[in-house]
Amino acid sequence: MVTGPLGTIRSPFPVPFGWFVVAYSADLAVGDVEPLEYFGRHLREWRDNDGEAHVQDAFCPHMGAHLGHGGVVENCEIVCPFHGWRFDGEGKNTNIPYSTRVNKREVVQPYPTVERNSVIMAWYHPTDAPPSFEVPELAEFGEDSDQWTDPIHREYVIEAPWQEIAENGVDAAHFRYVHNTDMVPELERYDTDGERSFMRSVQKFPTPRGVVDGRIDSDSWGPGLSVIHFSGIVDTFLMGCNTPISANKCVLRFTFRVKKLGDADTESTVGKAFADEVGNQVLEDMPIWQNKAHLVRPALADNDGPFMKFRKWASQFYAEPVDGEAMVYPPNGSYPAENDRELTASKKFGTPDPAFKL
C-alpha cells in the first residue's frame, strides 16, 4: 500500500549543490542591483562598472538592510542604502563614511559567479565549499553562435523539488500518457561520469509528409544545467536550467535555438512552434510534478527508464542529510491545474494538433 500522512515533509531532499542560473546576462545591465531568492536564502545580484556580475547575500552586516532594495553601485562597489557602508565584489567592507576604520571582520558572503552561455550562474553549497566542477562553454553560444537563430526563452515556477522534475528526463513512457504522443523516445543508453550524465535516444517524428527518423541527445552538468539536441526535422538546441528557490520549489528556464536554414521566416516559425510545444508539455507535466508523492522504492516495470541509476547520480549533489524516516513523501496540499492546457493528455477529450509533436 502506498500512502503517507498529510503534513509530512514534501520530499526527503535538501537543496542540491552545484552551479545554477540566477539571471540571463542581458537582464543585468552595468549598475543594476536586483534582489533574488534562491536556495532558501535572500540574495542579490549586481553588475559593477567594469561589467562583472556578482551574487552575494542580501543583508548588510551592519544593521540588516537589504542591499538588493536601494543599494547603489558606485564603480566596483555597492553602497548600502541605510548608512552608506560600501562593499566590494568579494563582500569586504571598504568604507564607512562616518568612521576612520572599516570593519574587517564582517563580510557579505559572495557566491562564486560565472557568466557564460548568455546566463549568470552562481555556485551554491550549503557549507560554502568551493566549486567542484566547471560550467562548460557551449559552442552554440561561442564559436558556432552565428549558425543558430536568436534565443527564445521560456520560464516556469514549479512547486516541486529539483529531483522530481529532473527525473522526467529518463521517463520515456510518460510521453504517451501525459503528452498524448503516438511515438515515444527509444533509449539507446544512459551513462554517468562524475557530475556529468549522458542520454542518447532515437525518436520518430510524425510530420505532414510522413514519419521522420530523428534523435534526442541530452547532456547534464550537475543539477542546474542540461543541454538537449533534437535532430531529424530541424536541428534544435535546448538549454534547460533548473534553479532551486527552496528545497521544494524551482524555477525552470529554457533557452531554444534553431540551426539556421537560410530562411528567416521559416526559422522563426519553427523555433516558436518548438518552444510552444515544449512549453505546453511542461504545463501538462506540472500537475503531476506538483501533486505526486516521492516514493523511495517505486514499483517499476521491466521497461521503465533508468530511474534508480538517475537517482544514484543525483544523490551525489546533496551535502546535507537526506531524510530517511519514511517511504512515501506526499505533497502538502494540492495544486489544481489553472487551465485546460495544464491538464494531462489522459484528462483531455480529443486529440491535440499533430502537426508539430516531439
Image (cartoon, rainbow, N blue to C red):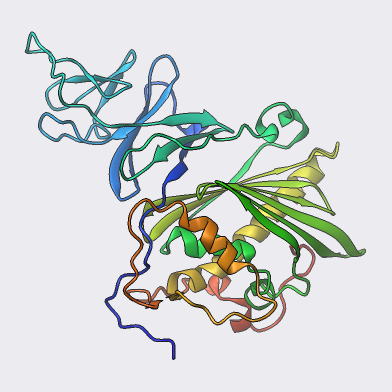
User: In the image, what residue occupies the spot 19% across and 25% down?
Assistant: 80
Residue lying at the far right in this picture: please name it: 209
**Considering only vertical position in the picture, is 330 above or below 250?**
below
Which residue lies at the image location 77% right of the left edge and 75% below the top edge?
182
**Quadrant housing the C terminus:** bottom right
19 vs 183: above or below? above
Please tell me which residue lies in front, 72 or 125.
125
With respect to residue 216, does 153 lie above or below? Answer: above
Q: Quadrant of residue 266?
A: top right
Q: Position of residue 61 (x, y in %)?
A: 15, 31
Q: Residue furthest bottom?
A: 1
Q: Is residue 45 left or right of residue 352?
A: left
The percent position of residue 240, horizontal first and vertical second, equals: 58, 49
Q: Residue furthest top?
A: 100
Left or right, 317 with reference to 246: right
208 sits left or right of 82 in the view: right
Residue 233's quadrant in the figure? bottom right
Residue 340 rendering spot, x and y as whole percentages: 55, 74
Relative to the observer, which residue lies in front, 193 or 169?
A: 193
Residue located 58% across and 76% down the image: 344
- Picture coordinates of residue 106 (x, y %)? 16, 26
In this view, the residue in front, 243 or 312, is 312
Question: What is the count of numbered marks?
Answer: 0
Q: Is residue 285 left or right of residue 219?
A: left
Q: Is residue 175 above or below residue 264?
A: below
Q: Which image quadrant: the N terminus?
A: bottom left
